[in-house]
Amino acid sequence: MNSFVVADPNKCIGCRTCEVACVVAHSSENIFTSTKLEIEFNPRLSVIKTAAVSAPIQCRHCEDAPCANACPEGCIVNKEGVIYINQRTCIGCKTCIVACPFGAIEMVSSYEDGEKKQQAGLKCDDGGKLCIKEKMVANKCDLCLGRQGGPACMEVCPTDAFRIVNSDDLVRETKEKRRRSVIGLSMPNV
């Protein structure tokens, strides 16, 4: 069973430290010494803040991943228990975004060697002037696949709002829910 990361909205303070850690974990450049134009700031999670609550939204690495099933190019695969997007082969069709029930995927500019990639044949009309169109690809949490120490978001959260959920946790939680249900059935209505 695939693992995934969740955050406790009662602990999340909306500081977005997790977003910065995600960018750092996936960047080959030092974002703290780079200029604004050099930074590829594309976190693979999104902190959502409302008046009442804040929490990051991340990929749940679904077992029968709707995004992977919808991808016409087969760019989304299960790699070592992680639902992974191969951005090199992604055509930017956005089908995965539509299919994701959590809103965990977004489109970002594609980079190669620190430069934005341009589309080979597509140009855009900018006020009567044809301009080269940049290549866009799908982006989502990959649990920091291959990173020693696991997901960077978990490591840096100042309130320990994150936890990784694995199959053992799900089995234990399911048993506990069933136990509480039986106890609830055995209690007389008051």
Image (cartoon, rainbow, N blue to C red):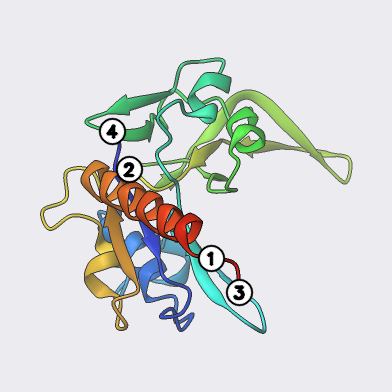
Badge 1 marks a residue whose secondary structure is: loop
**Residue 42 seen in this snapshot:** no
Tag 4 secondary structure? loop
Mark 1 vs 4, N-terminal side: 4
| Amino acid at pointer 4 | Met
Q: In the rendered view of the protein, which quadrant contains the C terminus?
A: bottom right
Residue under pointer 4: 1
Residue in view at x 67 percent, y 84 percent: 51
Compared across the picture, whether 75 is left or right of 159 comes to right
> Which amino acid type is shown beneath numbered disc 1?
Pro
Q: Nearer the viewer, mark 1 or mark 4?
A: 1
Residue 96 x/y as whole percent: 58, 31
Distance from Cα at disc 1 to Cα at disc 4: 38 Å
Identify the secondary structure beneath mark 2: loop
- Measured in 3D between alpha carbons, the distance from the residue under mark 1 to the one under mark 3, in whole angstroms, is 6 Å
Question: Mark 2 vs mark 1: which is more N-terminal?
Answer: 2
Residue at figure coordinates x 32%, y 43% from the top left: 113
Disc 3 marks a residue whose amino acid type is Val
Q: Pointer 3: residues within 10 angstroms few (<14), some, or many (20+)?
A: few
Distance CA(mark 4)–CA(mark 3): 41 Å
- What residue do we see at 44% from left, 75% from top? 16
For label 4, the crowd category at 10 Å Cα-Cα, with few meaning under 14, some 14 to 19 and many 20 or more, is few
Residue that numbered label 1 is attached to: 188
Instruction: Choose mark 4 or mark 3, whichever is in front.
Output: 3
